[in-house]
Image (tube, rainbow, N blue to C red):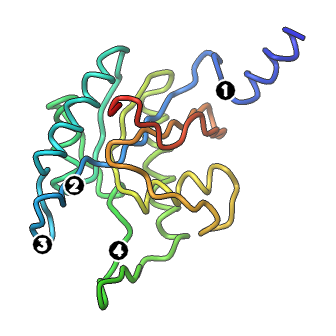
Amino acid sequence: MLKALRNLEAAFLVGVEGTTEIWLVRHADAYQHGEDEPDPGLSPAGREQAARLAERVKRGPVTAVHASPARRAVETAQHIDKDTRVDPRLTEMTFEIVDGTFNFTESPADVIARMSAAIDEIAAVHAGGRVIVVSHAGSITNYLGHVMRLEPGQLRLLPHFTSVSVVRALDDRRMVGAINDTAHLE
């Protein structure tokens, strides 16, 4: 039984030497204060969420922190590490707001392609480490669905602010280890 369990864990890249652990984090809240601006900074609640996330992250080693260039993502990431690397491929899906509804103008395939390219590069550069990647709900959800081999739109998930979803990467293999974890907010 123990051998079978270890083989199962290895298949999902649990405890496998050289595996990179990517923490996909949705940025902290930037909307509570009700301001309607194109690139808002964190709200007071968002700053508290980011501080709690940073405390959680400090419990283990972090190789690097990457973020979308959006102000809310950079501010979230900088609570963890002031030396945050900004990558435009980590941005949110492009959209328009029509009659109070999001109308996504970027295809899921395009989001998956740019997120995959960014994550692949991050995993290669920081092989065997733990990397924090601060991004956005739509981009994270589409990428997770891709790793899980779901058709676009099948993963019905809205990641919570500062939630952690873990992807393990080794060579060309990707495995999801956690989704929408908010233990640091409890």
Q: How far apart are marks 3 and 2 (CA)?
A: 18 Å
Neighbourhood count class around disc 1 (C-alpha, 10 Å): few under 14, some 14–19, many 20 upward: many
Query: Badges 1 and 2: C-beta atoms under 8 Å apart?
Result: no
- Of callouts 1 and 3, the N-terminal one: 1
Q: Gap in Å between the C-alphas at discs 4 and 3?
A: 17 Å
Residue 21 position (above or below residue 27): above
Give the residue type that dot 2 points to.
Pro
- Horizontal side, residue 66 vs residue 159: left or right: left
- The residue that disc 4 covers is 94
* Quadrant in the picture for residue 51: top left
Q: Give the image location of residue 29, x and y in percent.
A: 23, 51
Disc 2 crowd rating (10 Å Cα; few below 14, some 14-19, many 20+) is many
Whether pointer 2 and pointer 4 mark residues with C-beta atoms closer than 8 Å, the reply is no
Per the image, label 4 sits on a secondary structure element best described as: loop
Answer above or below: position of 17 versus 40.
above
Measured from the top left, where is residue 174 in percent x and y?
A: 63, 40
Read off the residue under disc 3: 36
In the rendered structure, which disc, 1 or 4, sits on the residue that comes first in sequence?
A: 1
Kindly identify which numbered label has been placed on residue 13: 1
Quadrant of residue 17 in the image?
Answer: top right
